[in-house]
Structure formats: structure tokens, C-alpha cells
Amino acid sequence: MKKRISLHIKGVVQGVGFRPFVYNLCQKLNLSGFVLNDPQGVKIEVEGEAKKISRFLKELKTKAPSASYIEKIEKKEIPLKEEKKIFIKESVFDKEKSVFICVDLSICDDCLKELLSKNNRRYFYPFINCTQCGPRFTIIKDVPYDRPFTTMKKFKMCKTCLGEYEDPSNRRFHAQPNACFCCGPSIKLIKDLKNRKVERISLKETKKILEKAASLIKEGKILAIKGIGGYHLCCDAKNSQSVKILRERKQRPTKPFALMVDDLKVVEKYCFLNKKEKGLLLSKERPILLLKIKKEEPWMQAIAPQQKYLGIMFAYTPLHYLIFHFLKKYQKEPILVMTSANKKDFPLVKEEKELDQLKEFADYYLIHNRPIYLRCDDSILRVFKNKEIIIRKARGYTPLFLDFKVKKNILGCGAELKSTVSFAKNNYLVTSSYLGDLKNYANYQFFLETLAYYQKIFDFKPEIVAYDLHPNYLSTQYALSLKDVVKVAVQHHHAHLVSCLFEHGLKEKVIGVCFDGVGFGLDGNIWGGEFFVLDRKSFLRKAYFKYFGLIGQDKAIQEPGRISFYILYHILKEKVFDLDLEFLKSFKKEQLKLFSTLIKKKMYVLTSSCGRLFDCASNLLGLKNKVTYEAEAAILLEMVAGDFKGKKSRFDFQIKKEKDTYIIDWEPLFLEMLKEIKRKKNISEIAYKFHYTLAYIIKEICCKLERDCGLKEVVLSGGVFQNLLLLKETVKILEKDFKVYHPQKLLTNDGGVSVGQVVVANENI
Ligand SMILES: [Zn+2]
Ligand SMILES: [Zn+2]
């Protein structure tokens, strides 16, 4: 029996080879009808034997192009039309825009093969791509995703390219960035910034540039190289002298650099790599993956000082592969440093006119003339219990669409560190890339740039705006400056936890544990070691760490010794001056006197921040006196603890009840820790004990709250849970009695706050 069905497919189905896939599938199954792009996705009508149609429907889902994402299929049966063939029809676009934009994709295997095949017309062409690969999100200026609305508009396709572009059976059918040596973008290598204009060049000239670039890297030079979402600074990772120079120039003494490789064997030589990690490393998203070091090499100390992990990504553009190809003339297993090219507290450089910002860092610039429209950093992931945890969400992972029904348009402005923004409209929530720390003018401009971009692409006008309670955040000030919108302030840790509730589809009351750095509290103090009973709408603060003082506010974050001093002075009073501890020596005598005066006069900011307690423990163990990047002291504590192999034990602590709230007193903990430091106990053991104690505290409080409220589900969130050792121990201890959730696709750090804000606001209107 024959029948005809009409299908409407929504999701990421444009620009990913979906129509040719449908076309070929119909030919294979002998079905007639048509397929076309429309504003919401792809529309299909197919006709044929009922059995064939059901097979079509099955394969539509199971064999769809890997770059596509089907959000929804609407299906209905319609009268027969009796055509003979299958057609790809002209796209229909009206005013309404399709919002589903594909993420940027790494080069596919077919293109890689062509790139390195002498007889191919794109041999060594640095911009080879097809419907299965290449830039997307970062070149799109407007929707629908069509060449005139991308930064490829200025390149007119040559006859051969156009032929591919118009041939439904071709891999490059409607591949919007399609190009070749005759018609597409070119590269250029420059030493000074006088002439940044890029002219079209031949294969021969391209080859010469690539050879030169490779020889410069071999010589130890630092190159600024244009990628998909912006520039990288690149040098030979095994050349510690180059890495040292890069560190000096960037004034980045210790923060680890990301590495790039083009060979799995190289990764396996130096790092542990399981199947899951292998898959992620080679995925189309090509994130930076944090991998445990297997074999320490001297050069790693310059890359990631005192770390146990390396951040490694696989080459993802044709240009990356070509650089590796030419480097192999000199080195057997090249490894490159590939770090985001930006000035401290500035966004990533994406345009040639911004290159002056890199003058102090780079010796040479490998530029090209395919413009990047929206800058986008590399994403960072790690694997925990065989599942990925996203630490920085950017290239390959944004825009991320999540199902979420709202009646009004909601904007979540995020917080300050690692900021993001989120939007909810109709049936979805979309969250932006990593925007950096929103602390200065340059990054604030990027924040505004991103907001404007999303508002245009998604045709989004906020009706409700959700923001952080912290009055000094630029994101808060932005929200408050908006006119004709309903404003909803959301407490920082409530947003953190609700983001996790949302990710796991939780709608009922749960116990929430938020261990974080900084978050403005309802009482005006800085919260960060919090236990809530909460749902998506509201929360009750049920327990927290006893407040302690931050001497000199933000200074105490940069110099954790100030926290150590407060804590020890609180416990020991004037006796603290008699202690023989490393951290005390990092301050002058007069400074310490001043601190004690400030404490006596209560001139400090109060906090319950768990992140700061980690800083303090790290500092007491002599690991860090001056922090040069966020959470550095805490990360070192985790690394040192990772070395401990003995029997687990914990420090003492005390839980007091004040009215309905539990206060966790850290005094016994630090007193005992101090004794062990004085006895010169192994610092790995002390560091481990600190982690284990915190996991144990979480369990104790959760058990009390279970008794009080009868709740069995625990949600963990906040920046401190980026610490995998703490997460591992906490989950292990809790799992016996509770169902435990933690963020995976959405972020546990402040990048997750904007999602939580939107969800909380939606419940409160
Ligand atoms: Zn391809
Ligand atoms: Zn061409």
C-alpha cells in the first residue's frame, strides 16, 4: 500500500548536509517527494510503499548526518501526489527566523584526506571544508544560515566550487563556507604589523608560508595564529625556553598552557587516556581535555607547573594539520602550546585590526582573510566517572539549546567571573559562550557585543531580566539599567544550584550544597559554603560555615595568607606571632601588626566561602602565598592531596545549631591541622585529610537535613566542585544514603549562574 507523509524537522538541520542525506535516502528506498529548508528547519514530503516509508523514518533518525541535531519531528499523513522523483526544492524563508545554529566543527576525515592528497585540487588548502565540517557559529552574521549572511559573503565561488555547491549528490552541496585556492580565503605570514591586508595566493606560495611558519616554530619563535574563534599564541611545547619567554611576555607565571597534538600516540605516551576521553579528544567539538599525566617529563614543568594534569586538544582546522605536517620535517612528535591570544583581562583577539594587542607577545603572525564574526574560545572538559564535565563552554559547545517552555522572554545576565549570558524564549533556553571575567571595560564590551548578537540572531527582546544580587557586578548594573523590563534579583548560590536542578530535570524540593568562591548573600555578607533546602522558586539557608574575615577584601583572595592570619588569630590571639610558619614570613612584621589591629576593630568583610577555606589550607601548608590565577592555591592543594595513598582519616569539626540553622565551626579543624604541620607530618596526607573532612562535613549536614526535612536528593554545585578529589569523595560518601546530582553539561563554576537565573526568574513571575 502506498502512502504520503509530510514531515517538519526542527533542530540543527541546516548547513549540515541534511537535505542531500534525505535526497539520497529517498533514492535508495525508491521514494518520491521533496525536501526543502524553511525558517524552522527542514520540510519533507515523501511518498511510496508504507514499508519503505517506515524504514525511511527509522533511518532518518539513526543515519542522520553526525553534525545534525533533531530537536523535534512533526509528522502527518497527507493525500498522494504521484510524482516520479525526489526533489530538493528552493528554500522558503519568510520573516520568521530559524534559531538553530550549528556549532563550529573540526575538519572531517574526508576533507583531511583531500587536504593531504597531492592530486586533489584542495591539496594544502588551509580552508577546505564541507557540510560535515568547518566553521559555522563563528562566521554567521544573521540567519537563515546562508552564504550571504556569513563572513564568506565577500568570496564569490568559482565555477568548480559552485558546481559542488549546487549538486545534491556532492558532499559540498550547500556547504556555505565552500572555497578553494581559486576563489576562497588565503593565509599570510607577517613579522611586523604594517601590512595586514591578505591577497589571494597560490598553492606554491601557501606551501612556502607553511614551511616558513614551521621552521620559525622549530627555532623557538612565538607565533600568533588565526583559528576558528580567534587567535592563538603558539610555540613549541617541548622548547622550555620558548615557553618561558611566552610566560614572561604574557606575565603569566604559573597558569597552565593548553597543548595541541595531531596524533593520539603522543597523548597516550604522556597521559592516561580511557575510551571515553579518546572519543572526546577526537570529537567534532575538539575540546581541551584535562588528562592525568602518566609520564612526567622535564618540559611539562614549564607548561603546567606543579600540576598533575595537562590540557590537551586535537588539531581541528586544516591550517593546524598543515602546520603539524610541515613541522614533522623537523620533529617526530610535535606538540604545540596553543593558548588564547589575549591581553590580561581582555577578550580573545579575533580580527587583524586588533593584532596590536599581541605586539608584546608574538614574533610573527600567521593571519588569514576569512573573518570571524563572533569570537569564541576553546572549550575545556574533563571526564569524571566516565561522563564529561564541562569546565569552560565555548567552541563546539555553543550555542547550546535546551528544552525549556516559557511564556515571556527571559534574559539571565550571569555573574562576574567566567561569565555567560542565557536567554529563554518560547520552547528553548540558549546559553552563550564563555565571556571571560566581567571586571573591566574590554570584557564588558564583549558582553554587550554578545548580547547584541544573540538578540539579533534569536530575534530576542527581553521582557524579564534576571541578575545577581551583588550590587557591584557589571552584569548587575547592566540589568538595572534596562528599561521597560521586569527585574528579578537571584541569589548567587540559588542560581548555581537551580542550574543543576534544571540540568537533571528536578522539580521538587532537594538539599543543595553550594561550595563556591564568592556570592553575595541575603545578609550582605559574602556566602560560599552553603547548604540550602530549595526548589526552582526559592530556598532556605539551612547551614553554612562559621563566618570569617577577609582582610582587605579582594586582596585576601590574591594573598591567602591574610585568611590564614585571620583564622589563626581568631583561634590563638597574640600567640600567632610566635608561630614558625612559612606564610607568616611572606608578610612584614608591621603588616601582621596592622592585620591584628584590623581584626580587633572588626574591619574586614565577613564570608562563609568554602573556596577561601581551601585557599587557607593550601597557604598553611606553604603551597601558595600569592595567587596569580583564580583558585590557584586550591588547585595546588588538590594536586598535592592526589599523591596520598595511605589510610583515610579526618580532622575534627563542630556543628552548632542556632535557631533553625546549623553553623559549621572550622576552629577544631584548623587547630588540629596546625598541630600536624608543626609535627612536620607529610603534607600530602594533611591535604588529603582536609578534602576528606569536607566531604564528611557535607555528609553530616545532609543527614541532619534529611532528619529535619525528609529529603533524599542532594544537589552539588559551585566552583569548588571543580575539585575532582572533593567531588569524588563527596559522591562516594553521600551515595550510600542519598541520590546525588552534580553539573555536567551545565557548569559548576560561575559560568552556570546565568542558566539558573533564568529558571528562577521563570518561577517567580
Ligand atoms: Zn569535511
Ligand atoms: Zn573555488
Image (tube, helix red, strand yellow):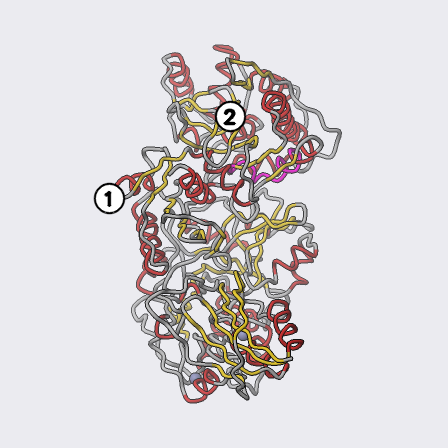
Residue 630 in view, yes or no: yes
Residue type at the position of mark 1:
Lys
Give the Cα separation between the discs numbered 1 and 2: 49 Å
Residue 411 position in % (x across, y down)? 37, 47
* In front of the other: 442 or 703: 703
* In front of the other: 548 or 639: 548
Outermost residue on the right side: it is 647
Residue 704 position in % (x across, y down)? 62, 21
Distance from mark 2 CB to nearest ligand 1 atom below 8 Å: no
Q: Dividing the picture into quarters, in which one does residue 525 lie? A: top left
Residue type at the position of mark 2:
Phe
Instruction: Give the label on residue 231, or none.
Output: none
Front disc: 1 or 2:
1
Tell me if residue 72 comes above or below residue 45 in the rendering. above
Q: Give the residue drawn at x 41%, y 45%.
A: 419
Q: Give the residue drawn at x 57%, y 44%.
A: 504
Q: Is residue 4 left or right of residue 492?
A: right
Instruction: Assess disc 1: are there few (<14), some (14-19) or many (≥20) residues with their C-alpha within 10 Å of its C-alpha.
Output: few
Query: What segment carries the magenta color?
Result: 718-730
Q: Please check the rendered image and state whether residue 680 is part of the magenta-colored stretch, yes or no.
A: no
- Ligand 1: give its quadrant: bottom right
Q: Please check the rendered image and state whether residue 728 is part of the magenta-colored stretch, yes or no.
A: yes
Q: Which residue is mark 2?
A: 583
Q: Dividing the picture into quarters, in which one does residue 75 lie? A: bottom right
Q: Give the residue drawn at x 53%, y 54%.
A: 258
Q: Identify the secondary structure beneath mark 2.
A: helix
